[in-house]
Image: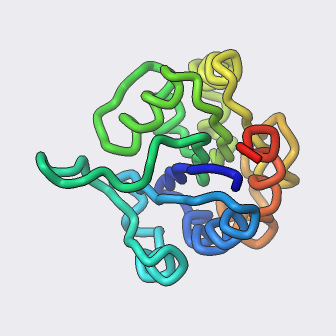
Amino acid sequence: MAGNVTVIVCGAPLAVRTPDLLKALLGEGWTPIVIGTPASRAWLPEAGVRDVLGAPPQFEFRAPGQPKQGGPPDAVVVCPATFNTLNKAASGAADTYALARLCEALGEGVPVVAVPTVNEKLWGHPVWRRNLALLESAGTVLLDVHNGRPGPRPVAPELGGDPGGIFEPSWVTEALRPFSRS
């Protein structure tokens, strides 16, 4: 058994591929749960997540007395990872359920694999590279959305902001292998 994995989905076109990512994770023995950022609601196929996992994605903090979903994560995947979410996580902002879970993982040293999907205009922002370096120094593996290798780069303009056609979920499962319990 690979372990528990929390999949955090941000609001970007690649979010529509979440069911494919979940199938790949299940195929590798991971037990995933999905947490969406507020902005992901427009992109994340809730019915597709429910079909694969038998449970919908979570978007909000649980109510008092409501049971936690899943066990503690053995790893966290952020896919797609947006400019906003990664910058906020690097600064320690936990103002949404997804960010709180990501910040907890970073604070506890839980392995994090992120697939940044950021355009060239935002990629050049002065705080961006510093925050990516900070996340990497905390152990976050940042994958290039074009080829799955470590070392991210901006989404190519010819993809029109949507790398979904070239993204392979196996890139994420491969990056998670060193963190598997088995």
Residue 94 spot, x, y in % from top left: 34, 30
The answer to whether residue 156 of the structure is visible from this angle is no
Residue 19 spot, x, y in % from top left: 59, 74
Q: Is residue 75 left or right of residue 57?
A: right
The residue furthest left is 64
Q: Is residue 17 above or below residue 152?
A: below
The answer to whether residue 119 of the structure is visible from this angle is yes
Q: Quadrant of residue 128?
A: top right
**Count of number-bearing discs:** 0
In this view of the protein, which residue sits in the foreground, 60 or 86?
A: 60
Residue 154 spot, x, y in % from top left: 73, 43
Residue 144 spot, x, y in % from top left: 80, 45
Q: What's the coloring here?
A: rainbow
Residue appearing at x 72%, y 68% in the figure? 24
In this view of the protein, which residue sits in the foreground, 157 or 150?
A: 150
Q: Is residue 32 left or right of residue 92?
A: right
In this view of the protein, which residue sits in the foreground, 161 or 85?
A: 85
Q: Is residue 3 left or right of residue 24?
A: left
In this view of the protein, which residue sits in the foreground, 108 or 166?
A: 108
Residue appearing at x 58%, y 23% in the figure? 109
Residue appearing at x 87%, y 53% in the figure? 147
Q: Is residue 168 above or below residue 94?
A: below
Q: Quadrant of residue 152?
A: top right
Quadrant of image for the N terminus = bottom right
